[in-house]
Each structure stands twice: as C-alpha cells, then as structure tokens.
Amino acid sequence: MEIYKKQTLSETFSVYFDKRMLRILLLGIISGFPWVLIGSSLSLWLKEDGLSRSTIGWAGLIFAVYAFNYLWAPIIDRIRIPWLTNKIGHRRGWIVTMQFIILISLICWSVVDPTTNLTFVIMIGLIIAIASATQDITVDALRIEQIGKDEGKSMQAGAAMAVVGWWTGYKLGGVIALNAAEYFQQAGFENYWQITFLVLSIVIITCNIFLMFVHEPQPTDRQESQKRNDQMIEEKLGATNAVTKSIVWIGGTIAGPIISFFKKNGFKIAIGILGFVFLFKVGEAFLGRMSIIFYKEIGFSKSDIALYSKGIGWITTVVFTLLGGLFAIRSGVIKAMFVSGILMASTNLLFSLLAWSGKSEWLFAIAVIFDDMAAAFATVAFVAFISMLVDRTYTATQYALLASIGTAGRTTLAASSGAMVDWLNGDWGIFFVITAIMVIPSLICLWAIRNKLNLSEK
C-alpha cells in the first residue's frame, strides 16, 4: 500500500471549495432521494395501514436490485438515449430518463391503497428501485469523471461530497415526506400518504432542473480505450461477423471489467476485497431497515422522527461526512475503514439502551446523532475505498459491480430484519446488540488484506 505525504489541515480542507464539489453534491442528492420513497416512506405507509413487521421487512427485498445493477451497467455505458443524449449528454440523458420513470411511479402510488393492492404497491416500489439503481450507475460514473484520475485528494473529497449529497437527499427528503404526511393526516385526509407522494414529485422535478448545471465531460479517453480492447478481442477471434461482434461486445463490456479487477489485485486479494465490501454494512442495514418501525413502536410521532432522525441527523451527517473525508485523506482510507467499523458497532448499542430504558427524547437524540456520525464516517470511507479501486476504462461497470456487492449484503441479508425482531419476540435491545456484532467478519477480511491492497492515496 502506497503511503502519501501529510498535508496541513487548511490545505486538506481547501479541496472542498473546488466548484466540482458542488456538482458532485447535487449528484449525491439525486441518488439519495429515491431511498426516501422505497425506504422510510414505504415502510411507514405500510405500517400505518396495518401491515406486519415481517411483511414490511420482506417488502424491503426490492432493494436487492441495487445489488445487481452491475449486470446492466455495460448497457448504460454503451447505449445512448435517443434525442436526450444529443441534447444534454449521455450520462445526463440516462439520469433524466430514470427520474421520469420515478415521477410516473409516484403518481401511480398516489391512487392506490396498499391494504387492497399490496402487490401493485410493491411492484411500483420495485420499478422505483430499478430506476434508482440504474440512475446510480450513471450518477457514480459522472461523479468520478468530474475528477481527473491522478487527483487522489480530490477523489476522496469528492467521495465525501457525494455522501453529503446522498444523505442530504435522503434526510431532507425524509423531512419533507414525514412532515407532509403528518400535515395531511392532521388535516383529516385519509389518503395522506398518497397526497404526500404527489408533493414528493415536485422534488423530482426540481432535481432535474438543477441537473442541467452539472457539466458532463466528453468521455473520449474512455471510449478510445474501450475501442482498443474491443479491437484486441476481435483480432484474437479472427473472422468478423455478427456472432463475433456480439462476443466482442460482451467480452469488452462485461468480462473485461471483471478480468481487469482480478488481474490488478490478484485472486486472493480480490476475493478478500469482495468479502469485505459484501459484509461491511450488514449490521447498519439491519438497524436501518427496522429503525423507523422501532421509533414508532416505542412511542415517537412522525414529527419526532422527522426532527431527530431526519432534521438533526442530516446536520450531523453533513458535518461528520466532511470531517470523515478529511480523516480519510490525512490518515488513509484503510485506517478510516477500521475506525468507522468500530464506531458503527458501538453506536448500535445505544439503540439497545434506548430500547431497554423506554421512550426518552434525549436518549433518542443521542443515539441518532452518534449513529449518524458513525454512518457518515463509514460511508465516506467506503465510497472513497471503492472509487480508488476502479479502472477508468470501466468506470461505470467496475464501480457498479463493487457498489452492488456492498448493497447485496445490506439488502438480501437485512430483508430478514423484521423476521428477526419477531423471532426475538420484539426484544429490540437484543436485536441491536446482534447488529453491532455483525461488523466483525468484515473487519477480519480487511485486516487479512490490509497490507496487500494496491491503492494510491496521494
């Protein structure tokens, strides 16, 4: 692992004033907001309509599509959206298309009742998840391409800004969703969640307007590099026909990124990386999937949740994400991963204390604030880690692959979170202790490969 030269704190912090960081912030907001829709909003909507914890937990399986978006990442890299690509660019064209699909989905949600049309509601949620996961492929690629491949400091700062943006979209989007639902409920509307989804549609439209201010670099180097790889594969195949051209396309866009990753790191180290990425945030996902249900069951109102979990939590997340970015730059991303993993486990235990002590606003605030601090450190370190591993020739595909593997651990395993709480007979305290222990296997994987990783942290 390469050791980089230390900088003064002011030199390190100055990177955040680069105008590209503002663009990355916006891209993060666009990426984070859909999680409000299929996460806390959908969960609370189903809860308040009388559905069980297990049903809500299993409904979260729609998040699993994020674990597989790498499968169609090569298509996103190659296929151009008719008309839109020529008007606003390849990456932005895909983002706008996916945002439009999410907008239509919200309109569909606004006219259904989950108690009588649960399958339809979940199907719409799945469509939102697919559109969001597809959008993330392009957002992440566009975010990485905002920064030069030799600008290591800016890449880590960009990771911090992307995380700030994601949490801004998620937290402030949650504030809007929860307060709107509370307002319409108190106003006497029985379909208050359906009306709230129409309000959230306005956020989608606003994001698309600001997206037009994000510069999209011309990907000439990437295209030329991919073309050279395609030509190399075609030369080895010999004859040129429809079959060989298909093989060339598949080999250049799907097999190429995977082979490149294993060749760069070696098989054993690559497996260690994938194991760590898969397991790192499983405990956080178990907590996150059930947290809003826990808040509701322990006696907090939607406005309480909006204030402490979304409003104050957003401020905490923003501050500590920026600090986490500075820590990663100055101490190294590997050390940052270990520190953040330990913090995640420790803060999960605060929720056990809250569960055992009963409803307490000050303890609720402390637990949420410290949890957001740990999540901010962990996320910025994680994003920086996988951003520094990708080959620029396959930016979208390799990043999508690594991010999807990380999401696979969080979504597929955490889908059983509601069933686990039921199995524990509603003992939330023990549940949160178990989530704290879940981080240990990932840190073991990281410890085993820590000195063999091929990272440049200049």
Image: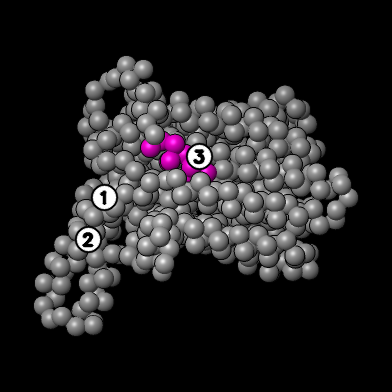
Q: Secondary structure at mark 3?
A: helix
Amino acid carrying label 2: it is Gln
Q: Label 1 belongs to which residue? A: 392
Q: Position of residue 409 (x, y in %)?
A: 48, 51
Left or right: 259 in relation to 44: left
Label 2, label 1: how far apart the Cα atoms are: 10 Å
Instruction: Identify which residue, 327 or 423, lies in the foreground.
Output: 327
Label 1 crowd (10 A; few <14 / some 14-19 / many >=20): many
Q: Label 2 belongs to which residue? A: 226
Q: Is residue 26 magenta?
A: yes
Amino acid carrying label 3: it is Gly
> In this rendering, is residue 53 above or below 229?
above
Query: Where is the C terminus found, in terms of image quarters?
Result: top left
Q: Is residue 394 magenta?
A: no
Determine contact: label 2, label 1, CB under 8 Å.
Answer: no
State the residue at coordinates (32%, 65%).
Answer: 78
Label 1, label 3: how far apart the Cα atoms are: 23 Å
Q: Position of residue 69 (x, y in %)?
A: 44, 60
Amino acid carrying label 1: it is Arg
The stretch in magenta equals 20-30
Determine contact: label 1, label 3, CB under 8 Å.
Answer: no
- Between discs 2 and 3, the one toward the N terminus: 3
Instruction: Identify which residue, 384 or 378, lies in the foreground.
Output: 384
Label 3 crowd (10 A; few <14 / some 14-19 / many >=20): many
| Residue 321: mark | none
State the residue at coordinates (19%, 57%).
Answer: 225
Q: Position of residue 261 (x, y in %)?
A: 26, 53
State the residue at coordinates (35%, 40%).
Answer: 385
Q: Position of residue 159 (x, y in %)?
A: 40, 38
Q: Label 3 belongs to which residue? A: 165
